[in-house]
Amino acid sequence: MTLLRFDPLLMTQSSSLPSPHASSGADLSSGYLPGMPYRHYKGGAYAIVGLGVIESDLSQVVVYESMRDRSRLWVRPLDVFAENVPTPQGTQPRFAPDWPASLGCLDFLPRATVLQVLGCYDAPYRHYHDRRHVLEMFEAAQARGVALTPAQALAVLFHDAVYVPGCEHNEAASAALIETMIVGVDAAVTSLAARIVMDTRGHRASVPESELVLDLDLCRLAASPADFDAWTAAVFEENRALLANRTGLDGDALFAAFMQRRIAFLQGLAQRAQLFLTPAFADCEALARANIARMAAGG
């Protein structure tokens, strides 16, 4: 069963979302989709695991997990989960749907489909190209006030949906997955989305629509030095087993071999006239280049 790996910091609280039993432009025919994020009226972030049935009386229960501590699952009767409770601010739902506002650009898709695609990012070997990465891209677009077209939104959602470290066909497989999973969307939109995904392989835009997606994909390069180093460590963890098997190295020697490859890759990017291609991300250029130079210098 797919679980929504939302970082609570990436969730945006909303009191205007419909109840689980209401409908909207997006598919909310079931408010208890596996992975659907909810917010407790006291502020806690949770995600639905699924619905269950008590054997003794066949009553329905909601099974859910806390985003703060996934070491245990919680169970609550469905009618209690869905009920309203009195608070000093007035009556509120005990749990309210908490779909991130940054995913509003995907409202042309059923939310069940969005959750299924996000589930592709949850493989335990993913430490960098994971759900956090794709959600951060949507968050960055919203924070910088740039509107993603349907094709761009699909491309962001799918761009690393298939990811195996060292594989040369990740982008092609991710692009093909769009046609496999998306129905009811104009073929011109899905075709353009697939082309944008393919452009993420070499980080060169073959169409203007790719430029924004490529900038979003690289924006972690412009993180603070501490965060940049943390993402570097995440890339290493993601590639550790592959590199160890291919080189026979371990320990410090393995990390040194990784850093040699990582620096070469980033310096190759830095040789381009521009890392970031759109005005919305122009401020990232100097920060990213400073991080790459610091890494190359051993800082």
Image (cartoon, rainbow, N blue to C red):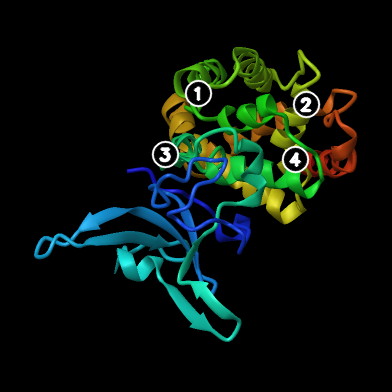
Front-most of residues 219 and 89: 89
N-terminal of the two: label 3 or label 2? 3
> How would you rate the neighbour count of disc 4 (Cα within 10 Å): few for under 14, some for 14-19, many for 20 or more?
many
Separation of marks 4 and 1 at Cα, in angstroms: 27 Å
Specify whether 284 is left or right of 186.
Answer: right
Spot the residue most to the front. 22
Relative to 43, say whether 274 is above or below: above
Disc 3 residue type (three-letter) = Ala
Specify whether 100 is left or right of 238.
Answer: right
**Element assignment for label 1:** loop
Q: Nearest to the eye among marks 4 and 2: give it.
A: 4
- Give yes or no for contact between labels 4 and 1 (Cβ–Cβ under 8 Å): no
Q: Identify the image quadrant of residue 65.
A: bottom left
Position of residue 87 measured from the top left corner of the image (x, y, whole percent): 53, 83
Front-most of residues 135 and 92: 92
Residue annotated with mark 4:
219
Separation of marks 4 and 2 at Cα, in angstroms: 13 Å
> How would you rate the neighbour count of disc 3 (Cα within 10 Å): few for under 14, some for 14-19, many for 20 or more?
few
Disc 2 residue type (three-letter) = Leu
N-terminal of the two: label 4 or label 1? 1
Position of residue 42 measured from the top left corner of the image (x, y, whole percent): 52, 76
Residue annotated with mark 2:
269
Residue annotated with mark 3:
123
Disc 4 residue type (three-letter) = Cys
Spot the residue most to the left. 56
**Element assignment for label 4:** helix
N-terminal of the two: label 1 or label 2? 1
Q: Nearest to the eye among marks 3 and 2: give it.
A: 3
Separation of marks 4 and 3 at Cα, in angstroms: 23 Å
> How would you rate the neighbour count of disc 2 (Cα within 10 Å): few for under 14, some for 14-19, many for 20 or more?
some
Look at the image and tell me in which quarter the N terminus lies: top left
